[in-house]
Image (cartoon, helix red, strand yellow):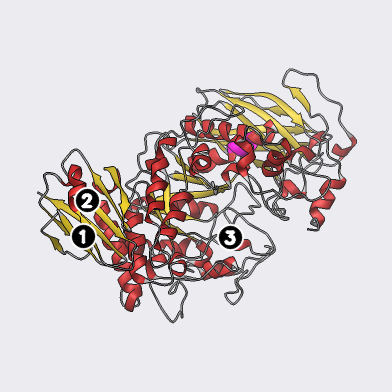
Amino acid sequence: MKASPLFSLALGLGLLAATPVVVHASSPPLPVEAAAKKAAPITRIDPTFWWVGMKNPKLQLLVHGPGIAASQVELAKYEGVTMDSFQKLESPNYLLVNLTISPSAKPGKLKLLFKGTKKVAYEYELRQRTTPGDKTKVQGLTQQDFIYFLMPDRFSNGDPKNDFVQGMRAPKAARDSMYSRHGGDLKGLENHFDYLKELGATAVWMTPVTENDMPKASYHGYALTDYYNVDRRYGTTEEYKQFVDNAHRNGLKVVHDVVLNHMGSKNYLFLDQPAKDWFNQWPGFTRSNYNSSALNDPYGSQRDRDLYNKGWFDTTMPDVNQSNPLVATYLIQSFLWWVEYTGLDAYRIDTYPYSDPKFLMQWGQALNEEFPQLFKFGEAWVGSTAQQAFFARNVFQPVDGFKSNLESVFDFQSQGAIHDALRGDNGNMTRLYEALQGDWMYEDATRNVTFLDNHDMSRFYSVIGEDFARYKMGIAWLLTSRGIPQLYYGTEVLMKNFSNPDGKVREDFPGGWPGDKQNYFTAAGRTGQAGEAFNYVSKLAQYRKTHPVLATGKLMQFIPQDGVYTYFRYNEQGEAVMVMLNGSKDEKTVDGTRFAERTGGFSTGTEITTGTALSNLSSFRIPAHTAWVVELKK
């Protein structure tokens, strides 16, 4: 594919970065360069502000402004803060200022003085931390949570004023275009917190809300153009902080979607590159091979590893060079910033394995040290359980020094298995069993995030042939198996379509815009099977909330026989739930005596979703394509 003009321009600059100049606070002054003869306004400093009391006392400030590299930097006296050095980069428009903030430092504004032929002063704010000790912030996720995943642009329009934002590359909403913004925003989601709670969700995950000022298809958010600002078409950065606070007041946790591997080509850091080695650049446009196998293949080639980790994800998504320690620090600080600023509860990491392995360890360690309660789960869309476990905390020895410190990944293996189990007249229930049999490879597989579909794949209801009985089987599995369940928006009301193209599975939620013909946010609007589907999800999710045995109980599964898969959730308090899935087109008689080690001590059961009583646990007749979720009773 032909390289983008921006990529070609970057390549024309050359491939090797110049050695940066570091000036320590005790060093003699540098000669003033000609570029500084005009006053250098400071465009921005990242991070935009910081906090006292962080466990890591070091802070790297990236200063951007025309010709700013010609300046010398001084820090006015500020108790507890010292400037270690300032550092020139390859571009004349950047400086790095390295500070140490001691535990004794107090909140306030420190003054940085940039001296060229003219002086430029900048007041940089240090704030007081709020997350330590506040149990409403950075709560993390556990198996007791149920994640509702949505695309904010496609969910609900709560603030029409941000449907047109002057100055952005795609300033206006256009619902008649699959690739344009449709106008959904933070306020729209806030307006429907009650809907999420009625459904039984305990956490909300949105595709990235950070600025994505790209000229095309910016609605998905995965080509960020600013690490420190929310996209104005969703709301302001301060409004996002208020959104997180409001979610917490409503008993909802917030998952923040992040991209480590790449950025958008309209990011100011790419348009005006601090140095050429801030990006992985090739002689010609080089796309990732999208295959992680070589990373831990004992016979793998370095070329295949480089193509995976350093190739670009797409033509407009420059690959960030995380092996550069300055870049690594910049990225790590930005993700620390969002947690402390908002109090968000979890990070979902897009394209997790594509990043530099050593950087991933650094990133995870830094977040673990500052925010031990923060939950982090990564997208590792790979082909085997072993490869999937490799990117979470696992039982394997380090490979080339890499030992993942990520506590959770999306369980693509069980997601593929539930699809196989529910397709065809006689689904492959053994695949479900085997997907969990490999859990020995994880430190704790119960932290894995389970799901039926997402924004990158065909919708679950379409995949199973719009069969409502099988739909209920999938929902029953999702909300009763081990792990943290995630539901993609609209699945609860039978939204459908195949991902050809992706926009087909990213349609607007009915009722999210004034004038919509259907409104699935209300019980009256959810007519027919859409209402039945919502009620089924809600029934199981609410039961899961009030019966922790389904979330935190142990799991025992039995090898499927004759197309029927049976497993149990149980705990030491004597609670037990039996789940039986019949993937066959025929009714099956199941010998219950083979489950005696789990049914012993129980005499009857009640199917949770229907209230049907089961008086005999020694034999069961389960209809075709049916899920039973049975609370066992003594």
Which range is magenta? 329-333
For badge 1, the amino acid type reads: Ile
Q: Are marks 3 and 2 in contact (CB under 8 Å)?
A: no
- Could you tell me which secondary element the residue under label 3 belongs to? helix
Return the disc, 3 or 2, that comes first in the chain's sequence: 3
Instruction: From the top left corner, tell me how far across and down residue 126 is, in percent.
Output: 55, 35
Q: Is residue 231 magenta?
A: no
Drawn side of residue 614 relative to residue 158, left or right: left
Frontmost of labels 1 and 3 is 1
How far separated are the C-alphas under marks 2 and 1? 9 Å
Q: Quadrant of the N terminus?
A: bottom right
In the orientation shown, which residue stands out farthest toward the right? 34
Q: Which residue is mark 3?
A: 220
241 over 182 or under it: above or below = above
Q: Is residue 330 magenta?
A: yes
Q: Is residue 170 visible?
A: yes
Residue 577's disc number: 2
Instruction: From the top left corner, tell me how far across and down residue 457 is, in percent.
Output: 53, 61
Q: Looking at the image, which residue is at 73% across and 55% down? A: 315
Residue 608's disc number: 1
State the count of labels: 3
Return the disc, 2 or 1, that comes first in the chain's sequence: 2
